[in-house]
Amino acid sequence: MGSYLQVDSRRLDGFEGLHQAVHGTHVDVMQLGRGKLRGTLSHVGIGDFSLSIGSFNIGMRTRRIASDEKLIIGMLLRAEDRVAHWSFDMQPSDVLVIPPLLEHDGIFHGASAYAAMRLDLDEVAEVFAGQPSLSDPEYWRSKNHFRADPALGPAAALRLARIVLQLTEHQTALTEPAAEFWRRSIAECMAANVICSLPPDDSGWLPAARRLIGKVEDYLDEAGMRPVHISEICAALHVSRRTLHRAFQEVFGMGPVTFLRHKRLCAIHSILRESRPGTTTVSTVAMQQGFYELGRFSHYYHTMFGEYPSQTLGIPAHELVASLRVAQNA
């Protein structure tokens, strides 16, 4: 193990920043809540060991397709609203296990903070030395949810946050013994909430609704970037609009029409962020995603992201004023 501490901390100014929510992986992200996303993301590396800790102020949907053999062990540090991973309904201090090569699906209904460490399965024997069950790689090959003991869990979560803050503020080289100490301290916080966890809820959370949502999202993935109408989904999956609405309300807290609109708005936001003025126009991108009333689209966009689409594209202020006048008169 190397003797150097590596810390990368940044402030987030859009949901796209959460694509690297866990160091070394790519996460597909969709903004669910309304407003300008603000948050922080830090990656702490101690030799080959890495920990990511992030926070954000509005609801998010995260999906990760694992492409490597890494194990991820995460802890929910804070949540102002409901949080669900797969079919597990989570509370602050709970621990989540994401085995290698397994797709991950998480829904944060409000402001949240999390921590996640990423490691090889063959490293668990060393990381969790002294804990017979936890040091067995087979223990971590299945997805799992450990419900934190309310008397003990918050203390472990608080200690983990303090360790990361301390390492972030003192970015200095570490000796081999010091690096080993801090790595074990981080792992111990996770292990404490696993060992002292309450019995897991094996029944899961809203399994039928989640299965239907999964079919919808598989259909949307096959559709690519083209806009998809709600009636098309109902016809393709042979479900009623009422059934679909109930499933989306149970899982996301919003109907399918609102969800699809948010998804299209997020696609537009990402396209505009990656474009430069003169290479495309807001109206062109909006039309390609199924918005034809530009005034209403501008209102939806501003409500969702806290800025107008022209601002995301980076149009100069004097041109922005002119474009807003056109939109208001549309």
Image (cartoon, rainbow, N blue to C red):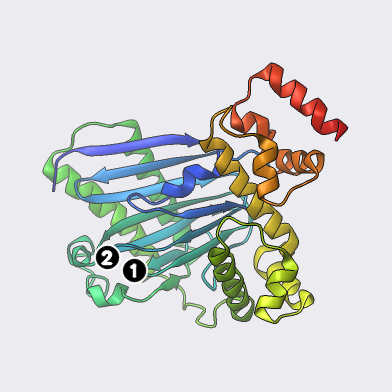
Vertical side of 256 occupied by 156: above or below: above
Q: Which mark is residue 101?
A: 1
Q: Are marks 1 and 2 in contact (CB under 8 Å)?
A: yes
- The three-letter amino acid code for the residue at tag 1 is Leu
Looking at the image, which residue is at 75% across and 27% down?
Answer: 323
> What is the quadrant of the C terminus in the image?
top right
Q: Earlier in the sequence, mark 1 or mark 2?
A: 2
Q: Is residue 313 rendered to the left or right of residue 295? A: left
Looking at the image, which residue is at 39% across and 41% down?
Answer: 42
- The three-letter amino acid code for the residue at tag 2 is Glu
Q: Residues within 10 Å of mark 1 (few under 14, many from 20)?
A: some
Instruction: State the residue in front, 132 or 270.
Output: 270
Q: Residues within 10 Å of mark 2 (few under 14, many from 20)?
A: few
Vertical side of 50 occupied by 302: above or below: above
Q: Which mark is residue 188?
A: none
Q: Which mark is residue 69?
A: 2
Instruction: State the residue in front, 187 or 207.
Output: 207
Question: Taking the image as drawn, is residue 306 in sight?
Answer: no
Name the residue furthest right: 329
Task: Assign a secondary structure to mark 1.
Answer: loop
Q: Position of residue 240 (x, y in %)?
A: 76, 79
